[in-house]
Image: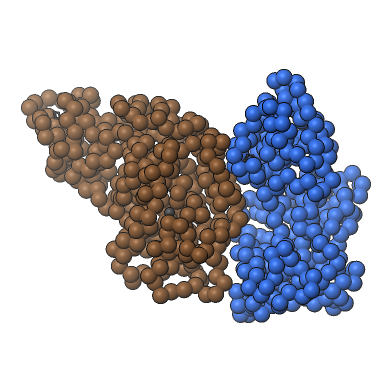
Amino acid sequence: MKTALPTPPAHCTFEPEDWLRLAKCWHPVARACDIGAAPVKATLLDEQLVIYRVKGQVVVARDVCPHRGVPLTLGFHDEEGIVCPYHGLRFGEDGRCNRIPSSPDQPVPAKLNLLTFAVEERFGLIWTCLAFDAENPQPLPTMPHWDDEGFQQINCPAFEVNGFAGRQVEGFLDVAHFAWIHTDTFADANNQFVPDYSPQETEFGFIADYWSSVGNYPASSDYRAPEGFQWLRHFEMHLPFTATLTIHFPGEARLVIMNAASPVSSRVTRMFAPIARNFDLHIPIEEVHAFNLRVFEEDRLMVETQRPERLPLDLTLEAHIPADRSSIAYRRGLKKMGFGEFFLV
Amino acid sequence: MNDVLKVVVDGLWRQGDKNLAVRLVSANGEPLPGWQPGAHIDVHLPCGLIRQYSLTGESTTESYLICVAQESASRGGSRYIHQTLRPGQTLTISAPRNLFALRDDGPVLLLAAGIGITPLYAMLLQREATGTPFTLHYFVKRREEAAFARELSHSLKHGVCLIHCSSEGKSPRQTLAATIPAPGDGERIYTCGPAGFMAAVRDVAAAKGWPEAQIHSEAFAPAAPVAASQQEETFTITLASSGEKWPVPANKSIAQVLQDNGVAVPLSCEMGICGACLTPVLDGVVDHRDTVQSAAEKTAATQHIALCCSRSHSRVLVIDL
Ligand code: FES
Ligand code: FES
Ligand SMILES: [Fe+2]
C-alpha cells in the first residue's frame, strides 16, 4: 500500500512536531456502519479525507484527486470504485486509479493513485493512521468487554464539539464535575465529595479505579442501587485521545463507554462513543444514543469555553486539586510522549 | 542513609486457597529493623516492580512476614510472587514505614476484608500479647480463602474474631451496618481492604456517629504535606548553578526555603500531586513524599524531587536549579 508522506497539511492548526506525533497514532474517523461504497468526507488533524468501501475493503485517502485536485467526496461510486466528477477518473482498491475515461486503452501511471492511509476496523469504527510506521506500529486502543459474550454493542452517532480533543478527553476523566454538570442525567448534586484514588501508569497510558457512591442509573430510571452500594468506575486511558470507562453496576452488570476523541483540528473534535453492556438489553438502542448524547451535551459548554483552548502540559500554568489526579496523569503522559508544552498553536 | 535491606526468602506457604505467605530473613544474619503493627515495606521484585506489603504476624526482628493475594487482575507483582518467587531467592526491601500505627491502648474495632487482614492480624497479635481488648471482623468471599484462619480460630484470650463470608450471605454490604456499633468511649476503628470496602466502613461508621478522626485506614501512598510532627531532620539544599546552599529545617519545605531566598520555584498544587515542582536531583538521596511520581520514577537512576513536599535522606541534596 502506498502511504502518504507524513507532512502537515496546509493551514495546519498544530505545531508541526505535535502534528507528526499525532499522525503516528490511530484515530477514529467514521462509524463502520456509515461507510459503504459512496465516498464519505472526514477531516483528521486538518487533513481532508475521503472514505469508501470497495469489494469489502475500506479505503481512507486524501480527499484530493491526483489529476486536478477536485475533492473525490463530490463524486459518486460504481461497483469498481469512486469516480471523480471532473474528468471521471475512477479509484478502486487501495486507492488505485482503475479507469481514465479519456484514454481507456493506456496503462495507468502510479502517479494517478490516491494517497491512502493505514486503516483498521474495530469497535464499530474506522480507524486510520496518517503516518503509519510499519517498523514501529502504534497499538490501537483496546476496549473491555466489547467482544465478550452477553454484551450488546452500540455505536452512538458521531458528535462534534468546538474544542480541543485534549480538553474533551480530560473532561471525560474528570470525576469532580459529575455533581455540577451531570445532575440532569445521572449524578447527584448533593454528592460532590471525591474519594481518593490513584492512577497507575501502564504502557498505553494509565488506568484509574475510582470508587464512590455516585450512582449511574439515569435520573429518570426507577432503579436504585442497594443501600451503601459503592460504584467502581474503571478508567483506561490510551494516549493520546481515547479513554474507556467501565462502570460496575450492582451484580455482574457492566457498562463500558469508549470516549474516542478524533482531533479534526486543534479546535474541533469529533467524538465517537462505542458502548458495550450486558444488561437492559431490551431497551431500544435509540434511547441509549439519546442518553449518551445528553451526557456529552452537558459537557459541551465547558469544553468549548475553557481557556486556553489548548491543553497546558506545563503543570504550573493551571491549579490542581486532589480530584485531578487523572487529569495530572493524563498531562504527564502526553508530556512523556513528547508533545509541546502547550500542545497547540 | 539509604534504607535498603537485603533479605532472603526463607519460606513460602499457602494462607487460604489464594494467598501466599512469604517469610523474609536478613541476608547478612543481622536482626532486621523493629516495627509496629500497621507498618509496611516496599518489596523490590526482580521483575522491576516495587510493591508495598503490610507486615503481618508477630512483630519480631528475626524475620518479616507478608501475605500476598493472588490477584486475577495482577499488574505483575502478585503474579511474580505467586508464580516465580522461590525460597532462597534474595530480594531488596525498604525498612518498615508505618502510616497506620495503633494510636493508643484504647478499645479497637478491627475491620478487614480480603487480604486487608495482614496489618490487622499483626494488630490483633499485639493486642493479645499485651492483653488489651479488641474485636476483629474479617470479611471474605468464601471461607476457604481466609488467610490465618487456623491461627484466628485458636481461642483468643482478650478479644473476639468473627469471620463473615459473602458466599454465606454475609457480605460487607449486608453485614456492616449490624457489625459496626455506635462508637464506644475513646474507641477507634482500624480498617484495611479494597477501597470500596473501606469507603463503605467509613460511610456506615459515619452514619452511626463515629467521628472521622477515630477511623483509621491503611493508605500506602497518602498525600504527604510537610508533616512537621515527626522528628524531621534538617538537611542542606544546594543549587548546582550557583553553589548557594541553605538549611531546610523540619518545619519548612524545600520550596519555602528556596522562595525565602529569592529563588523562583514552579508551584501549583503544593501537596505533591501535580508534579509542577519536579526538579532534577544531581546528588543526594531523596526522601520522596509526593504521590505524583510512580514507584519506577522514584527509584530510577535519574531522580526528580517534588520541592513542595519531599525531603532528603542524605545530609546534602544538590538540585539542578
Ligand atoms: S480532477 Fe478528478 S478526474 Fe480530473
Ligand atoms: S507543586 Fe504540585 S507536586 Fe509540588
Ligand atoms: Fe462530563
Seen in the picture, residue B1 relative to B170 is either above or below; the reply is above
The residue furthest left is A102
Output the letter for the chain in brown.
A
Q: Nearer the viewer, residue B146 or B299?
A: B299
Q: Is residue B303 left or right of residue A77?
A: right
* Residue positioned 80% across, 37% down in the render: B249
Residue depicted at 40% across the width and 46% down the height = A303
**Front-most of B98 and B23?**
B98
Residue B107 rendering spot, x and y as whole percentages: 81, 71
In this view of the protein, can residue A111 be seen by the observer? yes
Position of A157 relative to A341 (above/below): below
- Indicate left or right for B253 with A22 as reference: right
Judge left or right: residue A274 versus residue B8: left
Q: Residue at x 59, y 54 (%)?
A: A197
B19 or A167: which is nearer to us? A167
Q: Position of residue B293 (x, y in %)?
A: 64, 41
Residue displayed at 53% across by 60% down: A192
- Quadrant housing the N terminus of chain B: top right
What is the residue that sits farthest to the top in this orientation? B242
Q: Position of residue B202 (x, y in %)?
A: 65, 67
Split into quadrants, the picture shows ligand 3 in the one at bottom left
Name the spot of residue A83 as percent of width and height, x first: 14, 37
Describe the colour scheme in one phrase: by chain
Chain (blue): B
Foreground: B134 or A4? B134
